[in-house]
Each structure stands twice: as C-alpha cells, then as structure tokens.
Amino acid sequence: MAELLVGTKKGLVVLRGERGGGFEMAARAFPGEVVEFAIRDPRSGRYFASVTNGQFGPHLFYSDDPTGGWQQAEGPAFPPAAGAAVERIWVVEPGVGDGVLWCGVAPAALFRSGDGGRTWALVHGLWDVPSRPQWEGGAGGLCLHSICPWPGDTDRLAVGISSAGVWLTDDGGESWRRSVKGLIPKYLPEEARATTHAYCVHNMKRAPRQPQTLYMQFHGGVYRSDDAGETWLDIGTDRGLPSDFGFPLAIDPHDPDRAFVIPLAADTDRVTPGGRVCVYETRDRGTTWRALREGLPQSQAYLTVLRQAFCNDGNSPLGLYFGTQTGELFASADAGRSWSTIAARLPPVASVRCA
Amino acid sequence: MPKVILTGSIREQVGGVGAVDVDGDTVRAAVAALEAAYPGLRGWVVDERGALRRHVKLFLGAEAVSLDTALGPDAELHIVAAISGG
C-alpha cells in the first residue's frame, strides 16, 4: 500500500493505493486552509503538516495518524530578540540525530527540533550571519525551502534559500558559510554578478548514497556539485533540456547519477513548455537529459508544478509523483517511463510527498 | 472581568469554547491572558512580535479597536476573522 500526502490550497489530501494502480482519498484534513507541505518522518512514523490559516497565520501540526486528529507543535516561532515573525513554513526535513528534525521558513530561517518535532528552536548561527540585511526574496518571498542533511553525520547540513544562495555548516548549525561558486545569476547584469547576494536557488537535493553529490534547480540553470556543495557545475545548458528554468527536482536515492526535473518555459512564462508535460531524466549526472512523456498530456497542457510538488518513493523501480497548480496528480511506478493520472480535480497542489 | 468572544476557526483551538472570561485592562493584556489560558492560541491572534495578525479584527460592540484600547470590567471583546480569503 502506497500513501501520498498532498498539500493543497484547500487542505491536506491523503491518498492511498497500489503503486501503478488507482489511489483513493483516505482523508482530507485542514479543510479550507492552505497546506503548504506535509511529510512523514520514516523513523518515528509521525506526520507533519504546515498549515497557513488565511487569518490566523502559519502553524505546524503533527499526528501519528493523518486520518485522525492533529496536534499543534510549539513553533516554529522566532524569539522576541529576532524581531521577526514566521510568514510561511516551507519544509520539514528529518535530520540525522535521534529525534532531530529541521524546518525551513520565510523569512529565510532554519529551526531545529530535538524532540521529534514537538518543539522548535531558531538556529541562531544562520539567522545571525552578517550578510542577512542584504538578503532579498523572490516572488515566493525570502524563504528557506531546501534542507539537505548528510546521512550518518549530525554536523553537516546544506540549505538552499531563495534568493540568498546555498549555505553550509560543518558544526551542526553553529557556523555557516555561503557557497555559490559556479552559479551564474543570469537574471542580473554581468557587472552586478560579482557582488550580489541574490542567488535564487529553487530546489536542492543530496544523493544519499554519495552525499558529496548534490543537484540543484536554479532560477535559470540546473547544477550539480561533486564536492558537497562547495562548487557548482552547469548541467543545464545544451544537454537536452527545453528550458533551464523550473522548480521541481527529484533524485533516485539508490543512484547518485540519476536525477529528474520538470522544466517550465521561462521565468516570465511558468508553464510546461509548448503545452506538453514532460519530466526530464538524467542517468549520467547531467551530461545528457531525455524526456519522459508516456502517459502525460502532450497538447494544450500549460501546467505549473511548484517546487515541493514532485517526489520519489524510494522504491526500486523508483516511483515518482507530481502535482500541479490545476489539481492534477501524476504517478509513475517505473521511474518515469510511463505515467498515469491518479487525481484530476484537486485544489491547486503545493506539495507531494510519499509517506 | 472582560469577556473574549471567539468566532470562526479559532474557536477550534480552544475546544469549541465561544466565550472566555479573562483578566486585563487593555485588549493586549486580554489577548495575553487568553493565550496563557489556552497556549495553543499562541501565534494565532498576534504573531511572535506581538503584532495583530493582518486579517484579524477586534471589536468592542460596533467599534473596531486596537491592541492598545482600554477594556472596562464589563467589556466584551470580539476576535473576528476578517472577510478575506481565496
């Protein structure tokens, strides 16, 4: 039995079904509220949902049964001295240590839980970096949306911020350094690139079997790092992608050479190019990309897929799932070779994760 | 003692209770007392800076009021979700 957590503009949808078959709705939680992100921590079995109430603000909830009741976590919330308020909770990521989870929010900040996600504390080391006053957000706000723990190492972490680049820590979050060498902010005049803080990372994932390998979808550019995020290599130009713009990114957790993106036409036209929905796969670390389109709409389909709305299920062959702003949910049980539509009339989809 | 009247989805956070008696001689103090009685409400009416959430409105009778408004002992403070959404 596969379980999908689908965060939508009108609540959390929990779908259950068989890989490669149909899915049924098992629950709809937080009706009417924006569920930005939902995930299950595989270590504890605990579910998390980031819920933004239109009037009463963003809050994080957890549950041991997504079809039952939910409890509100204590935080994430800034301490008074920070002079800030959480605007949106973008991502929750299980960490490495016992009971450790990470949470990324807007305005761009990282929170840590050491008790399985019940309480959260600001990671001051990143909040206090000297360049922070110069950071700016993109269209989605100044947000920390990508968190990449290092399997087996509690101290090493990489995070991606729109639009403040990649930040690395080797001491569990005490100290941080920016790491953008090789990234090209093509949206800025060449003269401005050397001094800018505006590195608009859209998505970043680490290959768990080879943790020094990271993939990134940038605001105009697809990149790979072979040295744990210290430097970045262009793998998006003239290699078979119809566009180097997009947000979604998935990897094969079993194969560090394999990654998937869903390009959008351009930053000024954030829809699937040419009205055709295609996932692009590389099996050679980004040297070449090929389209995976069997079963996906190939005409008059101008869809938008948000950054958290694409995931893998970790199985072999790999299951892949993505949702759209027009309420479709597509699934593949064979690593993208063929796709089926498993839901067609959901509210706009913000996130998709396999439980 | 002032009374706080809760409406809408915020009422779910206090177990369905619609009215709560609280101590406080200002709206801000009454909200703080409400949060102390129901910790699950922290961050719902005011954010962690103490600022009223943008789409929350406060009324004393017909009058829209601010966090700094004084409350009399018989005041009934309505916490209302604004008519906004999408």
Image (tube, rainbow, N blue to C red):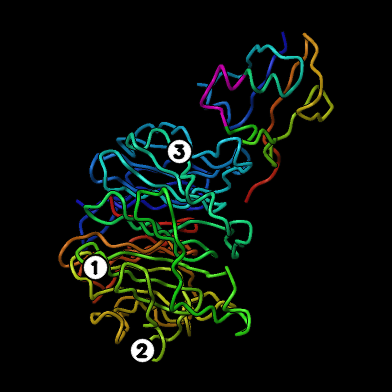
Please identify the quarter of the rendering in which residue A298 is found. Answer: bottom left
Is label 2 in a helix, a strand or a loop? loop
Residue hosting label 2: A240
Whether callout 3 and callout 1 share a subunit is answered yes
Q: Is residue B70 above or below residue A11?
A: above
Give the extent of the magenta segment. B34-42
Say which label, 1 or 2, has the lower sequence index: 2
Indicate the amino acid at tag 2. Answer: Gly
Q: Give the label on residue A252, or none.
A: 1
Q: Give the label on residue A127, or none.
A: none
* Cα separation between marks 3 and 1: 31 Å
Which of these two is toward me, A182 or A117? Answer: A182
Q: Is residue A276 above or below residue A78?
A: below
Is label 3 in a helix, a strand or a loop? strand
Q: Position of residue A69 (x, y in %)?
A: 38, 31
Closer to the eye: label 3 or 1: 3
* Cα separation between marks 3 and 2: 43 Å
Residue sitting farthest toward the right = B63
Say which label, 3 or 1, has the lower sequence index: 3
Would you say A206 lies left or right of A344 here? Answer: left
